[in-house]
Image (cartoon, rainbow, N blue to C red):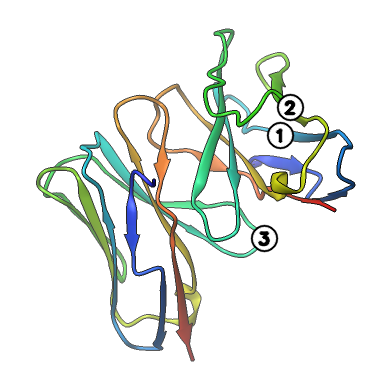
Amino acid sequence: GAGVSQSPSNKVTEKGKDVELRCDPISGHTALYWYRQSLGQGLEFLIYFQGNSAPDKSGLPSDRFSAERTGGSVSTLTIQRTQQEDSAVYLCASSWTPGAYEQYFGPGTRLTVT
Amino acid sequence: TQLLEQSPQFLSIQEGENLTVYCNSSSVFSSLQWYRQEPGEGPVLLVTVVTGGEVKKLKRLTFQFGDARKDSSLHITAAQPGDTGLYLCAGAPGDYKLSFGAGTTVTVRA
């Protein structure tokens, strides 16, 4: 079956512009996660969605970052007024149930802020 | 400060050699996972270990979970160029969040 898909695969934007990153999880997966991976670093947790529950936004680095998940499926991560330090690979993952040990990752969106 | 410390950060070996990657923490985890990530792709789950002292084998890869569930190791026997990649360990303290190590970049030269 289809895996997690993300778009765009690459995004170059100017400092100060807003960007939207999209994630389409595996069908039937109830949990969805966003992570950020900077060069030489591990994955940094950003936000977690589970069904209709309030999302866990504890990992969002600033109020310029927001995310939504529509209809329990597709998710969009929005970064407003981008800064150069936002440059990173943004990864989305999904899993069958909350707290499931196995997470399935998409290929990521490489964001470059110039 | 990383919750999980991986060592070494980089490892370059010749095809056919063995290698071991370590993942250590002062925290206890209910489970620990190993992922491999190739350039331009997301991490791919290799294994999940949940029991202290557990050993799992996946072809030439052997994974161990420490008795106290604070550390883990990944051993590759007779490494091949196809084993090249970034190896990440990730621990679940008990809820849905995974804490990732910074990763070990493994290069296997033909």
> What whole-number distance in Å separates the C-alpha atoms at marks 1 and 3?
16 Å
Q: Residue at x 33, y 41 (%)?
A: B91
> What whole-number distance in Å separates the C-alpha atoms at marks 1 and 2?
19 Å
Mark 3 residue element: loop
The reply to whether dot 1 and dot 3 touch (C-beta < 8 Å) is no
Mark nearest the camera among 2 and 3 is: 2
Q: Is residue A62 left or right of residue B105?
A: right
Residue A16 occupies quadrant: top right
Name which residue type carries label 3.
Gly
Q: Is residue B9 left or right of residue A68?
A: left
Name which residue type carries label 2.
Arg
Q: Which residue is mark 2?
A: A64
Q: Residue at x 32, y 82 (%)?
A: B78
Q: Where is residue A87 shown, x and y percent of the image?
A: 72, 49
Q: Which residue is mark 1?
A: A23
**Chain of the residue where label 2 is placed in the rendered structure:** A
Q: Residue at x 55, y 8 (%)?
A: A53
Q: From the viewer's side, name the closer residue of A100 and B4.
A: B4
Q: Are marks 2 and 3 on the same chain?
A: no
Q: Which residue is mark 3?
A: B40
Residue B106 occupies quadrant: bottom left
Q: Where is residue B36 shown, x and y percent of the image?
A: 47, 59
How packed mark 1 is, by other alpha carbons closer than 10 Å (few <14, some 14-19, many 20 or more), is many
> What whole-number distance in Å separates the C-alpha atoms at marks 2 and 3?
26 Å
